Amino acid sequence: MKQKLITFFDKLMPFFDKLGTNPYLQAISGAMMATLGPAFIGSISVLLIVFINMLPNAENLTQLTSVLSKVNAFTIGSLALYIAILMAVNIVRKLDENEDYVAAGIISVMCFLLITPLDATKEGVPALATTWLSAQGVFSAMIVGISVGILFLKIKARGWTIKMPDGVPPMVTRMFESLIPTILIAILFIIIDYLFNLTTFGSMHQFIYSIVQKPLQGIGGSIGAMILISLLQQVLWFFGIHGTNVILPIVTPIWMAMDIENLNAITAGQVPPNILGLAFFNIITFGGMALGLVLLMLRAKSKQYQEIAKISIVPSLFGITEPVIFGMPLVLNFDLAIPFIFNNTIALIVAYALTKIGIVANFIGVQAIFGLPVGFHAAVQGSLSIILLQLGIQFILSPLLWYPWFKRLDKKAYALEQATLND
């Protein structure tokens, strides 16, 4: 049976390798990860606003909260703008690294703004509504960025550019080469914007949000979908494939958009609408739940596992569990296959249930910073209950889930070591 499974996944390996190196998935992953800086700054500003509002003299600090609100508006509140730029930049870099990806990024943000409806102030002054610059515009930004990147490369490949004579500085040459692609792509998006204005949706943003983003969040943002993603990710890890790199890019835009909705709600003084999100997944599945195994290994009878634990314990406390995954190993270790594959899922279900019934606070959507130690990793959510949840999962639930499987394996290893010594 074991050999059949290994043979089966050996056959699937080329498919997963292609999926993991797919330029479009890599571009999406790269773009979303690159927004973590602005998202973190915006998240901190939200936390500070919440903290200030709790102070007895909060009304005397309105100028500070005003500044922090502006920080939030131009970070989290404008995340779709950053994604539009980064998506086009990453697409061009992945498909043809010699092309002018900066020009593609500029064209992309221009096209994103071209399809964004203009509003007006009470005085009738034209104004850009921020509605589509934040969570609601994330999928529009992705679609615009990918489309612009592909169109830019195709137009350049056909030679539809202004050729400059030799001796012209490269910077000037690149500017003129991108001029025709800019004009053609801009015209296309102007036409698209005009056509959507004629529909009941009123804009391309509203169409994508209603037809694509909202349904995907309903499906991909459910606990069932998160469980499925977790299982697929761990199965790939078990067979030595980097499951995080292969699977997470598919759902990151959906889960991150849900986190942004939560942050926007907190800023408005409302309860976060979503239990789940990328922050929830990353904090609950901290280090792939391998820390509990390392803690058990520290008290193992087998010298072999004690030594691995000594090497692995410090990195594991910071969420870096590759030393135990590949050092023990957990990869292709059928004795520990069940906990390795299913522990994350159990933790997600427990955390979801505790949050659903109100014992644990809703996650506010701040993106957890990789490399922070357990506990501090969860502290960015601004709730003691979430910190205690992570600590409880890692130091109580995780060791309990690993215990029966590891105990049996440790007993076998100890017996083998004793037999070797007696020989």
Image (spheres, rainbow, N blue to C red):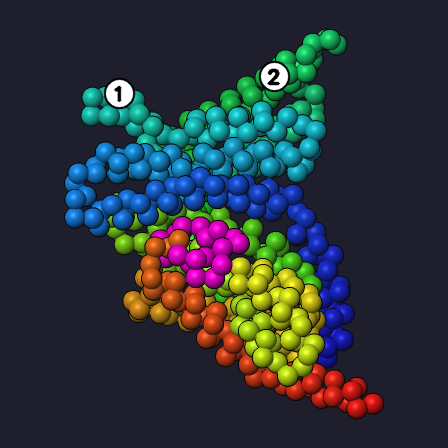
Name the residue: 25% across, 51% down: 270
* Residue 278 picture location, percent across and down: 46, 54
| Residue placed under numbered mark 2 in the picture | 175
* Residue 147 picture location, percent across and down: 56, 34
* Residue 337 picture location, percent across and down: 63, 75
Which range is magenta?
A: 363-379
**Residue 374 within the segment the image draws in magenta:** yes
Q: Nearer the viewer, mark 2 or mark 1?
A: 2
Is disc 2 in contact with disc 1, using a CB cutoff of under 8 Å? Answer: no
The answer to whether 346 appears left or right of 298 in the picture is left
Q: CA distance from mark 2 to mark 1?
A: 33 Å
The secondary element bearing badge 2 is classed as: helix
Viewer-proximal residue, 93 or 417? 417
In the rendered view of the protein, which quadrant contains the N terminus? bottom right
**In terms of secondary structure, what is the magenta stretch mainly?**
loop
**Residue 42 within the segment the image draws in magenta:** no
The answer to whether residue 218 is seen in the rendering is no
The answer to whether 270 appears left or right of 24 in the picture is left
* Residue type at tag 2: Met
Earlier residue among tags 2 and 1: 1
Name the residue: 68% across, 57% down: 16
| Residue placed under numbered mark 1 in the picture | 125
* Residue type at tag 1: Val
Name the residue: 66% across, 38% down: 94
Q: Quadrant of residue 42?
A: top left
- Categorize mark 1 by other alpha carbons within 10 Å: few (<14), some (14-19), many (20+): few
Residue 121 vertical position relative to residue 130 in the rendered view, above or below: above
